[in-house]
Amino acid sequence: MLRIVSIDEQRLTTAADLLAKGFPERDAGFWARGVSRLHAYARDHDFASVGSILLAKDEPVGVLLKIPGYHMTTGQKLLNLSSWYVDARYRWFAPRMLQEAMADDTFVYTDFSPSENAIKLNQQLGFRTFASRNLLFALPFTALFGRNAGTVLTIDQVPEGGLSARQVDGINLHMKLGCMALAIKLHDTCHPVILDVISKRRIPMARVLYATSAQTVVDNLRPLSRFLLKRGVPLLSMVTPADVQVRHAINPWPAHAYQIKGVWQDDVINEMFSERVFLNA
């Protein structure tokens, strides 16, 4: 008999072991740290679950990580379907796992890194797919030749009332998780931007996790580049829809699919509640 159970505190190790089996390029320690971090976040913010485990009788044979969150501007509830693995013997049951994970139709569901098989399955379950590009910018160059439509502010420099309470909460959460936050001021409006900084071949690179639109970032590459260079970051990556034309960008990575179920504006960059943040992927 197959049954689906939630990942609770007693099942964190089981979930990590299954993920290590399904994604052997990452060791068990990586998954244990990521699942524990995600569970602590969900517990502190009153989210019911971070995923599910599939049991065949009492044997764990499948796992699905779910990353709950909310849209920082609209408040819309979000759920990212993250890492997913089912033993080959029971893969026929995978659609049922996904249906159970998406039972609440008040959420917008996302999958930012679907495999080819997941793309096909998600589409059958009502997801739409759109192609995106992960662009790379050399900041010493864009600091000289990028566009400059506004001003980059640190969060402390944002005038009182310049950001909503929900935006402030989202920024504070992600800064505690090690992300970097700033605001781009255009006229009298402050647009928050959240980034994480990783190392690519030992060179620091900032990745845009949130921006009200890709265009906002593109139009302010000059001040944004200077802001990051002062903090020792010479590279910036940003995901945009595949058909957006961006000057001064390098396109070193193959296109990949984003999948969404629900209302979503494609030009918005919003990977705040993704494996990039919670699994450091």
Image: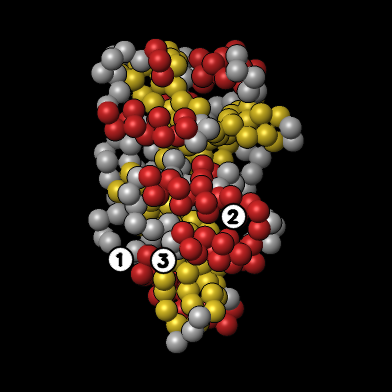
Residue 50, given in percent of the width and then of the height, sits at 43, 57
Q: Is residue 235 left or right of residue 267?
A: right
Q: How much space separates mark 3 and mark 1, taking CA atoms?
A: 14 Å
Q: Is residue 46 left or right of residue 12?
A: left
- Compared to 29, does 182 lie above or below? above
Give whichever of discs 1 and 2 has the lower sequence position: 2
Residue at screen point 49% across, 84% down: 57
Asked whether, in this view, residue 2 is left or right of residue 34, the answer is: left
Tag 3 residue: 6
Q: Are marks 2 and 3 in contact (CB under 8 Å)?
A: no
Which residue shows up at 59% across the image and 55% down it? 32
Residue bearing the label numbered 2: 32
Q: Which three-letter amino acid code belongs to the residue tagged 3?
A: Ser
Does residue 200 appear anywhere in the picture? yes
Q: Classify 10 Å Cα crowding around label 2: few (below 14), some (14-19), many (20 and above).
A: some
Q: Residue visible at 63% across and 52% down? A: 30
Q: Amino acid at mark 2?
A: Ala
User: N-terminal of the two: label 3 or label 1?
Assistant: 3
Residue 2 in the image, given as x and y percentages of width and height? 45, 82
Q: Secondary structure at mark 3?
A: strand
Residue 102 place in picture, x, y as percent: 34, 64
Q: Around disc 3, counting alpha carbons within 10 Å, would you say few (fewer than 14), some (14 to 19), or many (20 or more)?
A: some
Q: Which residue is mark 1?
A: 103
**SS label for mark 1:** loop
Q: Quadrant of residue 72?
A: top left
Disc 2 from disc 3: Cα separation: 16 Å
Q: Residues within 10 Å of mark 1 (few under 14, many from 20)?
A: few
Residue 250 or residue 57, whichever sits in front: 57
